[in-house]
């Protein structure tokens, strides 16, 4: 079974991938995400297909990976997927952005927010992020 559908992760050229790697920093494979969340890989794949998580194929083996920043501490002391991510991803995808460009937008500094959109989401500023995301595309 594939880790993501072809519409979710188009291959990037090496320069585009290295610039995305520099922006994102830490990446997690789906088994790594499953371990962090205390669940199985099948449930993580479902989260990808439902757009709760977004990622790209990367590395020499072209494994599907998601940014580690998409996981946040949960109330029970574990980790969970950043809840505000899905709506923002859907806004950007509806605007025509492929997943690698969605990731690039989330991790590039956004002047109007004074930080990156992903950091704004992590700090609870989802309405501001989605307002800006609606202008992208």
Image: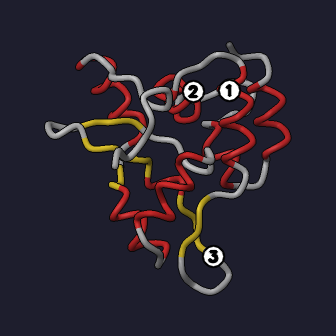
The answer to whether residue 136 is above or below residue 131 is above
Disc number for residue 74: 3
Q: Are marks 1 and 2 in contact (CB under 8 Å)?
A: yes
Q: Nearer the viewer, residue 7 or 74?
A: 7
Q: Quadrant of the C terminus?
A: top right
Q: Residue 43: horizontal and vertical position, in percent?
A: 51, 64
Q: Which residue is mark 1?
A: 92
Q: Nearer the viewer, residue 44 or 97?
A: 44
User: Which residue is painted at 55% across and 46% down in the image?
Assistant: 49
Residue 79 placement, left or right of 96: left
Q: Which element carries disc 3, helix, strand or loop?
A: loop
Alpha carbon distance from label 1 to label 3? 26 Å
Q: Are marks 1 and 3 in contact (CB under 8 Å)?
A: no
The answer to whether residue 91 is above or below residue 86 is above
User: Which residue is painted at 33% across and 35% down in the image?
Assistant: 21
User: Which residue is painted at 75% across and 42% down in the image?
Assistant: 87
Crowding at dot 3, Cα within 10 Å, few <14 / some 14-19 / many 20+, comes out as few
Question: Does label 1 or label 3 sit earlier along the sequence?
Answer: 3
Q: Residue 134: horizontal and vertical position, in percent?
A: 79, 22
Residue pushed farthest top? 137
């Amino acid at each position: 079974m594939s880790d993501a559908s072809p519409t979710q992760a188009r291959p990037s050229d090496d320069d585009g991938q290295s610039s995305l790697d520099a922006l994102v920093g830490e990446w997690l494979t789906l088994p790594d995400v499953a371990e962090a969340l205390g669940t199985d890989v099948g449930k993580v794949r479902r989260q990808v297909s439902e757009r709760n998580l977004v990622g790209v194929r990367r590395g020499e083996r072209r494994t599907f990976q998601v940014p580690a920043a998409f996981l946040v501490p949960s109330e029970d002391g574990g980790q969970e997927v950043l809840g505000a991510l899905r709506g923002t991803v859907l806004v950007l995808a509806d605007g025509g952005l492929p997943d690698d460009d969605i990731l690039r937008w989330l991790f590039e500094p956004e002047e109007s927010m004074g930080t990156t959109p992903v950091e704004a989401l992590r700090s609870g500023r989802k309405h501001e992020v989605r307002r800006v995301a609606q202008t992208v595309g």
